[in-house]
Image: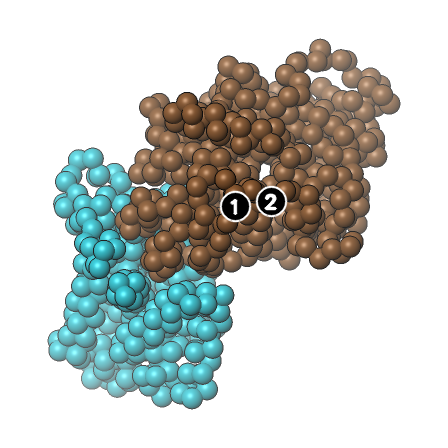
Amino acid sequence: MDKEKLEERRGFLKQFGATLGAAGLGAAGVGSAHAQAKPKGNIPDRPVKVGHITFLTGPAELLGGPGQRGHILAQEEINAQGGLLGKRKIETIFADEAAGTDANVKELRRMKLSENIGLFTGVISSGNTPALGPVAEELKLLTLFNDGCTDFLFDKAVPNPKYTFRVTNIQSADGITAAIGAATHWPKARRVASIQPDYSYGRNVFEHFVLALGKLLPGTEVVSESWPKLFSTDFTPHITKILAAKPDVLVVGLWGGDYVAFYKQALRYGLFDKMKVATTLAFGGSPQAIGKDHPDGVLAGVHANYHFLYPSAERWPINKSFVERYHKRWKEYPSFEADGAYVALYLYKQAVEKANQLLGGWPEDEAIIAMLEGAGINSPAGYLYIRADNHQGYKDAVTGLSKRLPGYDFPVWDPASIVSIPIRSITAPPNWPKPGQGHNESTAAADWIKKTWPAARSA
Amino acid sequence: MEIVALQILNSLFYAAVLFLIAAGLSLIFGVMGIVNMAHGMFYALGAYVAAWSVGVAGSALAPAALFIFLPLAAVAVGVIGLAIESTLIRPFYRRPEEYQLLVTFGLLLVLEDVIRLVWGGTPLTASALVDSLGLVQIGGLPYPVYNILMIGVGVIAAAGIWAFVYRTKFGVLLRATAQDRRMAAALGIDVGRIYVLAFGLGCFMAGLAGAIVVPTQAAVLGMGVEVLVIAFVVVVIGGLGSLEGALVGALIVSALRTITIQFWEEIELAALYLIAAIVLLIRPTGLFGRKT
C-alpha cells in the first residue's frame, strides 16, 4: 500500500477511532498480573461442575472443536494451580450441540437438575442461545455463552438477563466490521453482491453490511443476492450468477466447510480476479482449515472477534503466551471460538476471586453476577468488557486482508492491513431502544445506524 | 447469454453426481428391496478416501497420475460395501422392513462418527486435480475443464450401467432377482451372491460420486446426510428401483435447483419438495417406477 493511500485509509478510520495496521491497540489497560491474593474464608474442595455444549460433530465442528479445546486448556491451567480459589477443581461435562435445539434444552436441564452444574458455557449456534437463555434464567443457572452471537438474545429473548452472559461480540458488529474493512481498503466500490447462508446469521450479516456500507460509501447498490442453504456444498450456480452481475465487492457470510468449498470453486471461475471479496468468517474456523491456495487480499473476517496474530506478540504478551500454550497443547493455532471459551472460564475465575475477597467463602451466584457485571479482563484478543445493562461482552472488533506469509502453512493476515475498531463505534449504546420499543428494525444496532450515522458525502 | 451456457453446464455436472448416487440407491432397492439409509455415507466415504489419498500421494506423483485415485476410491468403497453387506445387512433379509431401516440408519450414524474419528473435523481437499486441467473460456467466462470431463464420466457411467444391466449375463441375473426373488432362486440363481454384488455395486457408484465431486468442493463432516435427502427426492421423482428414473430425476432436480438459484433462491427447497409431492400425487411410484 503506498503512503498516500495509507494516509487516506487512516483518515477514513478516524471517524470510528479505529486503527489500521498491527501497531494499533485498544486504549484500556495493559495486562498486569495482580498479585494473587490469598482466598478468604472456608472453601469447600468439592469440584465445580461446568456444562459445555458445542458442535462436536458435523460441519460446524470446525468452530466447535477449537471452542472445546480452548475451554479444556483454561480448565487444565486453572486446575494446575489447584482449581478455583486454589481448592475447587473444574470438571466439565461436554455435550454435542449438533443434537438439535430441543435436545440441547433437555440436556441443559439434565445438566443442572441431575448433574448439578454450577456454570454453563459454550453454544455456537444463534439458533440455540435464544432457546437456552430463557431456560438458564428459569433454572437460575449462571451461564457464559461463548458465541451464538445473535442480537435477538438480549434484544428479545432475554431482555433483562440476570444469570445469562455472553463473552463474544454481538452479531450485528460482524456485518458492520466487514463494511468498514471493505470501505477502508476499497473505497471506490459501489456495486455490491452478496452470498449468504439462508438463515438468521446470513440475513443479519447482509442487512448490517449493506446498511453500514451505504452510510460509508456514496451511491452503493446491491446488484445480486444469493441465499444458498446452510451446509450447501455446490456453489457453482451462485458463482456464475454473481460473475454475470459484475459487482465491485462481494460480501460473503459463508463459514466453515461452506467457505472452503466456496473459495475453491470461486478460484476456478476466476472470481477473485474480477471483484473484491469481503467475508465475515473466512478465518473463523480452525486457521489450518484454509489451504495455501486461498488468494491474498480477501477481507478475511473472524466474526469481528479474534485472530491469533492480533494484538501482535510484542504489544500484547497475553496473546503471545496464549497462542504458544494453545499451540503446544493442541498442535494448532487458536480461532476466535478458542479464545472465547478460554476467556469465559478466566472471567468466571476472576469474578469468583473478587467476590471471595469481598465476602469470604465460596461466593453465591448473586455475588459472582455482581462481579461479572461491568467486569473487565485482559484477554488474548484485547480488553474485554461486560456491560452491566445487557450482560453482553464488548471488545474491539478486528478484521484484515488475507495473505500467505512464510512460517505458516495456511494464510494469515497481512499485518499492515489489520483494521481494529473500538466496539462502541459500531454497537448501539446502552438504553438504545430494542426492537419493539418504538421501532421495528430487526436489531437495536440497525435502528441506531439508521438514525445516527451520517450518510456518506459524494467524494 | 454465456451465463445460460454456464448454468447448463453447472446443472449437468450436479446431475451427473446425483445420478450416480440415486442409481446406486435404486439398484440396491430394486434388487434387494432394502432402502439403504446409509447410502449417503458411502458417498462421503468415497469423497474422504479420494481426498485423503490424493493428499498423501500429492507430492510424489504428477497431477495427471493422481486421477487414478478417483476410481480407486470408488472401488475401495465398493469393497467396504461388500464387507458391510455380509456382516450387517444379510442377517436382516428375512426380517420386516423396519429392522432394515433401523440397521441402515444406525450404520449411517456409526459411519458418520467413524469418518470423524479417522479424518477429524478439518475439510479435506483435492484441488490439484481440478487445477491440473485448467480452464476453458466459454463466451468470455472461465469454466473448469475438470467439470466438463466429469460430465463425460457421468454419461459414460450411465451408459455403462445401462449396458451392464441390460446387455450382460450378470445383468440378466440381476434383473431376474429384482423381479421375482423366489423364482430366481428356484431356477438355481445364487440369490445371496447377487445381493452382495448388487450392494457392492451400489456402494461403488455412491463412492464414485463422492470421489468425482471432492476435487471441486471439500470432504466435510455431514456431507453424507446432506446428499441423502436430495438423493431421496431424486428417487421419489424418478421411481425407486429404476435406472432411467434416477437419470431423469437427477436431471429434473438439478435443473430446478439451478433455475431457482438464478431467479428466486429462497424457494429452492420448497420447489424441490413441491415437485416431489406433485409426482407422488400423479404417479405414486415415481415417473418410471414399477408398481410392486
- Residue placed at 42% from the left, 88% from the top? B282
Looking at the image, tell me whether mark 1 or mark 2 is earlier in sequence order: 1
Residues behind callouts 1 and 2 on a single chain: yes
Residue A339 in the image: state x and y as whole percent: 56, 31
Q: Mark 2 points at which residue?
A: A455
Residue A114 in the image: state x and y as whole percent: 73, 46
Residue A408 in the image: state x and y as whole percent: 36, 26
**Chain (brown):** A
Q: Quadrant of the N terminus of chain A?
A: top left
Q: What element carries label 1?
A: loop
Amino acid, disc 1: Pro
* Badge 2: chain ID: A
Q: Is residue A242 in sight in this rendering?
A: yes
Q: In this view, does A198 lie to the left or right of B95?
A: right
Depth check: B212 or B96 in front?
Answer: B212
Q: For label 1, count other residues whose C-alpha is less than 10 Å away and answer few (under 14), some (14-19) or many (20+).
A: some
Amino acid, disc 2: Ala
Q: In this view, does A91 lie to the left or right of A57?
A: right
Q: Mark 1 near mark 2, Cβ–Cβ under 8 Å?
A: yes
